[in-house]
Image: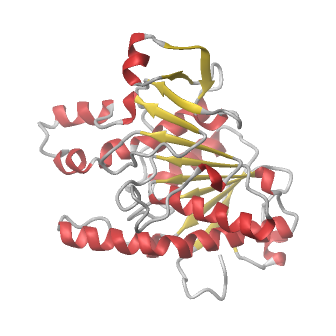
Amino acid sequence: MSKSSPWKNLRAICTRLRPEEIFIEDYKGLVASKFNKAFPTKFFIHGFGHNFNCSFPQDIKDVYILNGFRVNLIMVDWGALAMDASSFDPIIALRNYHLAVDNIPIVGRRVGRMINFLNQARATTLNKVHIVGFSLGAHVAGLAGEHVYRSWLDKILRITGLDPAGPFFQTGDIGRPLTQNDAKFVDIIHTDIGQMGTVKSDGHANFFVNSGRPMQPTCAESALRSGFTEMIPQVLSGTCSHNMAPVYYAMSILHTSPFIEAKRCFGYISYEAGLCFLRSSVTFGEFCMPGTEGDFYLDLEPMQLRGKYTC
């Protein structure tokens, strides 16, 4: 993101057919890139223990490209600051997670500076910027949006939080969570409430898929098939259900005829009983309209994505 940055592994990779790294204040490099100012710009920000080569954002990037979407896709790689999530030692895992949370302000400000650079260079406008953040990446997105607002006294168009991380963000004592103040429109997709995902409904529109809680359908089926032996770590930690949020979002990009719909209800029990508000259906995911407000519920069976990415 910045050639002079001490954080060498904090990168912005702009991609359509081939990846190109772009840098803050590098006007010549931006002009020479495939970045198209006529297109909307989407940033994808991964979470704890991941990097830009993981299934999020790569699977979603592939869905946009293979289906001919005319968008600028920027994948933020903060893998060196997102720490290692592979340890089964709970003390090491907690320490690494805490370090990743501490690094979020650094990454959020840097993403905000990149957006400011693109806006100043007239490569985009704030009304064309949409950030999609998964897990800790959702909170990075919130800080990026706040940084942009402080710079321009204007907000980016949209932030989508894919199951924003819960640990350390429930009270705000350590982490600063994504809120609806961070963009003109903030939509949140819940899949793992109370484990890896937040219990808060801080978006303008909050979507609860399959109740928004663990275990999500594929996770339960996989656990039963394996006799729970292979799935125990993911089931107990909530990782499997947490990871379903990007899958559901990818499904929403593909389903355009008809769109995937959700209903505004008092809760999931009301949804299951069919006791929802009249004319309450709204579009879920990618094509959710800014201005949508409330808590919405839907049931989905996860699709199988390409599955070539290892994390």
Question: Can I make out residue 68 in this image?
Answer: yes
Q: Is residue 224 left or right of residue 161?
A: left
Q: Is residue 5 above or below residue 288?
A: below
Residue in the picture at 66% in, 81% down: 2
Quadrant position of the N terminus in the picture = bottom right
Q: Is residue 175 left or right of residue 160?
A: left
Q: Nearer the viewer, residue 297 or 75?
A: 297
Quadrant position of the C terminus in the picture = bottom left
Question: Can I make out residue 20 in this image?
Answer: no
Res 122 → quadrant: bottom right
Q: Position of residue 154 (x, y in %)?
A: 79, 59
Q: Is residue 201 above or below residue 196?
A: above
- Colour style of the rendered protein structure: secondary structure
Res 204 → quadrant: top right
Residue in the picture at 46% in, 70% down: 79
Q: Position of residue 295 (x, y in %)?
A: 52, 31
Residue in the picture at 63% in, 41% down: 66
Q: Position of residue 151 (x, y in %)?
A: 76, 70
